[in-house]
Amino acid sequence: MSDEIPVLVGTLAFGLGINKAAVRAVIHLALPKSIEQFYQEAGRAGRDGLPADCVLLWRKRDVGLLAHFIGQLSDQREVNRAWDRYNTIKRFVESANCRHRQICQHFGENPKWKSCDACDVCGSSIAWLAAERAPLETRRGYYYSERIEKFFFEYVREQLIHRYGRNTVEEGGLKVYTTIDLNMQRQARKAIAEVLDEPEDPASAIVTLNPENGDIEAMAESESYEKSQYNLAADGHRQPGSTFKAIDLADALSRGIDPYTTYYFSHTLEPGWLAISTSSFTPLPRFRLQSCA
Ligand SMILES: [Zn+2]
């Protein structure tokens, strides 16, 4: 059970300038400052021509740290250059385009191929990394690891940025507790799918609020996040309109009014019957914040 293999770990301080041809893996544990730095370091792997792996592990917090270091610079031209490098590396890691292709393009080349078949974007995975990661997967009991509610997540992210600022949110480490109820979410999707099931049917969205506390319990829509990132439920700004008809009708029935009778009855509401300011109805997700150690 004691399979021991010698591992030589080199850090930046150790000196990457040492030319060792048989490096089998370069692992970054944080976001490099620039593509140039990443390429120079990752390029240490496999100089003997044999297969080698490069892994870049990073957290949102790294981005905040880079921004912090840029804030320490005094020369304005250097600051501008640092922000350029920062934006480029951030785009590189967040992009859904082939990593090799991005690196080539960064250095002014325009490869004819579209896919390298060797990076994560192109669907390649590293066997030893996958094997290491496998046992961890089973420990994820948390249910959002199986159900990704992208529209709602994106909505909460926007609300967090609005409330706490982009820097705080991008630094990461916030624990966000949401109120979404996955069962309600399923019911909402089912309701949409059952009624609007033809291709020419309009797009639709359902938001369910708990009237007692304003918790959002469901936020679902007919479009998939992959197809359209427009959040119809949160950004549509439609009047509730017919939503109230069902409540009115139910109330009328409970008072013994025949649903087949017609009333023409309209007058301004008496003071005391007026709705409170609509802004208090703006759905806001409830969340509690807590810093991760
Ligand atoms: Zn690729």
Image: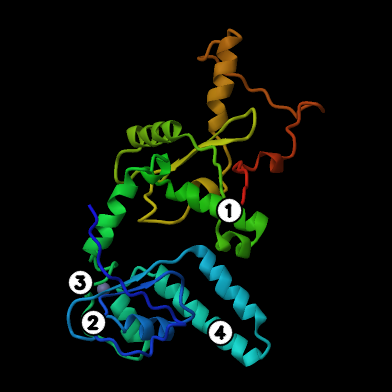
Mark sitting earlier along the chain (1/4):
4
Mark 1 or 3: in front is 1
Q: Identify residue for label 3.
A: 117
Farthest left residue in view? 50
Q: Identify residue for label 1.
A: 293
Q: Amino acid at mark 3?
A: Asp
Mark sitting earlier along the chain (3/4):
4
The answer to whether the residues at label 1 and label 2 have Cβ atoms under 8 Å apart is: no
Does the beta carbon of the residue at mark 3 sit less than 8 Å from ligand 1?
A: yes
Q: Identify residue for label 4.
A: 82
Q: Residue at the spot x=35%, y=91% of the render? A: 108
Nearest the eye: 252 or 43: 43
Dividing the picture into quarters, in which one does residue 45 lie? bottom left
Q: Amino acid at mark 1?
A: Ala
Where residue 89 appears, x then y in whole percent? 45, 77
Dividing the picture into quarters, in which one does residue 140 lie? top left
Q: Identify residue for label 2.
A: 22
Q: Residue at the spot x=44%, y=41% of the render? A: 220
Does the beta carbon of the residue at mark 2 sit less than 8 Å from ligand 1?
A: no
